[in-house]
Amino acid sequence: MPEQPWAVDCLSAGLDYYKLTMSQLQYQRFPQAEVTFALINRSAVRLACYVDVAHLQAHLDALGSQGFTAAEVAYLATLRRSNGQPVFATDYLSMLATTRLPAVQVRQVGDDVHVESRGPWPLVTFWETVVMALINEAYFRGWLAAHPHQAAEVWQVGQARLAESVARIQAIPDLRFVDFGTRRRFGWAWHQHVITTLQAQVPQQLVGTSNVALAAALGLRPIGTFAHEMPMVYAALAEKQGRNVRASHQDFLHDWYDLYGSDLSIALTDTFGSGFFFDTFTAAQARAWRGFRHDSGDPIAFGEQAIAWYQRHHIDPRSKSIVFSDSLTIDTIAHLQAHFAGRIGVLFGWGTRLTNDVGLTPLNIVMKAVAVDGIATVKLSDHVGKHTGPSDKIAEYQRLHFAYS
């Protein structure tokens, strides 16, 4: 296998596009909110077995001090909305060009690794995908160094599985997918190899990438809307300010649509449970927004729920879309494509099993906004294992704020 260098020498190599679209709204609405992000290891894998903590800290320090390069900001300035207007405002880009990122603290705790950063929301948000990408890079570099005799086998397995995926994709001409593989990839060099291969062999089916550096370098469309952190932090801020926590979800959706309109109107439904979402999303919003993103729970059940929901509101589901993005494999993608064909638009945000399918067990890590201005945040997933927040506060949110009407 080719050398896996620390080639991540700019933020955008580890940055998903939705971090920028979210950051711009954060900059406009809550520029002074102090948010804490923390790494959460959901698996039994002990990261410190292969992660060089000092090396990781030094690399993050260098990226934070460097901030966004002139070339990165110049690229962002070229992006346009469907109406021809810039995606990113001049004052926002000027802020990116002149501001360092908040410090990140990396430390070893037993045989695991703890990472945390606290700072202004529009800036600290960037560390989520950057830290996750670099943790993966460090872990699998360490694994290869400890198992040099298996490096060639890893390369061969990865190549074979990539070739199989390409063949499966080519056999389903209507299938469309987006690269969502930044956060849990095997490494930056492998990520580049996978996407350049797909761009060459299935160019009409690879719709774009969430990775900002690859979008810029390969001329791909950067794709992303928002993540769970937006309604999570909006809810915590509402709690702090004595406002209606339940109503904060609609406050966020209105702010998002006011800023980006239809262009970025794919709604993530499961921050506080999809039942709550469908209970409070209005028919007017359904007509205006392009569709939904599924990120937890049974995807078939979710798709059927979405179709039925549109039909109850006298909206043709075929005019809308679902972006499936939860733990996708080529098998689940093919199954979902066949199940929903002709019934609703389908797009796949393909992540871990696209960019980390080399025969090794991928890491199951996340980096979440865990607090804002001292108030703990909560996420109520459609899968209990993905709930985040203090247990008593999860129960409070379920009981007081986000129960269905």
Image: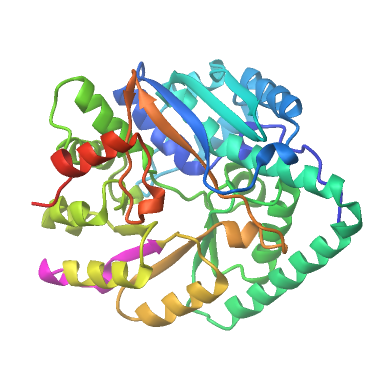
Q: Which residue is at the front of the view, 53 or 310?
A: 53
Q: Which residue is at the front of the view, 16 or 128?
A: 128
User: Can residue 259 be seen at all in this image of the molecule?
Assistant: no
Location of residue 54 by image quarter: top right
Give the answer, above or below, for where 38 lies relative to 401. above
Name the residue at 29% across, 53% down.
Answer: 269
Q: Which residue is at the front of the view, 323 or 94?
A: 323
Is residue 138 inside the magenta stretch?
no
From this viewpoint, which residue is outermost toward the right? 149
Name the residue at 12% across, 57% down.
Answer: 283
From this viewpoint, which residue is outermost toward the left? 405
Is 70 on the left or on the right of 279, as rendered?
right
Where residue 317 appears, as percent x and y from the top left, is 24, 71
Give the answer, above or below, for where 84 lies relative to 201. above
Is 271 on the left or on the right of 325, as rendered?
left
Image quadrant in which the N terminus is located:
bottom right
Is residue 319 inside the magenta stretch?
yes
Where residue 308 appears, as percent x and y from the top left, is 19, 72
From this viewpoint, which residue is outermost toward the front? 110
Where residue 22 appears, as percent x and y from the top left, is 39, 36
Is 195 on the left or on the right of 221, as rendered?
right
Where residue 59 appears, as percent x and y from the top left, is 71, 26
Give the answer, above or below, for where 142 lies relative to 100. below
How many marks the image carries: the answer is: 0
| The magenta segment | 311-323
User: Can residue 144 be seen at all in this image of the molecule?
Assistant: yes
In the rendered view, how is the structure colored?
Answer: rainbow
Q: Which residue is at the front of the view, 320 or 385?
A: 385
Name the residue at 27% across, 28% down.
Answer: 236
Give the answer, above or below, for where 17 lies relative to 101. below
Name the residue at 70% across, 36% down.
Answer: 48
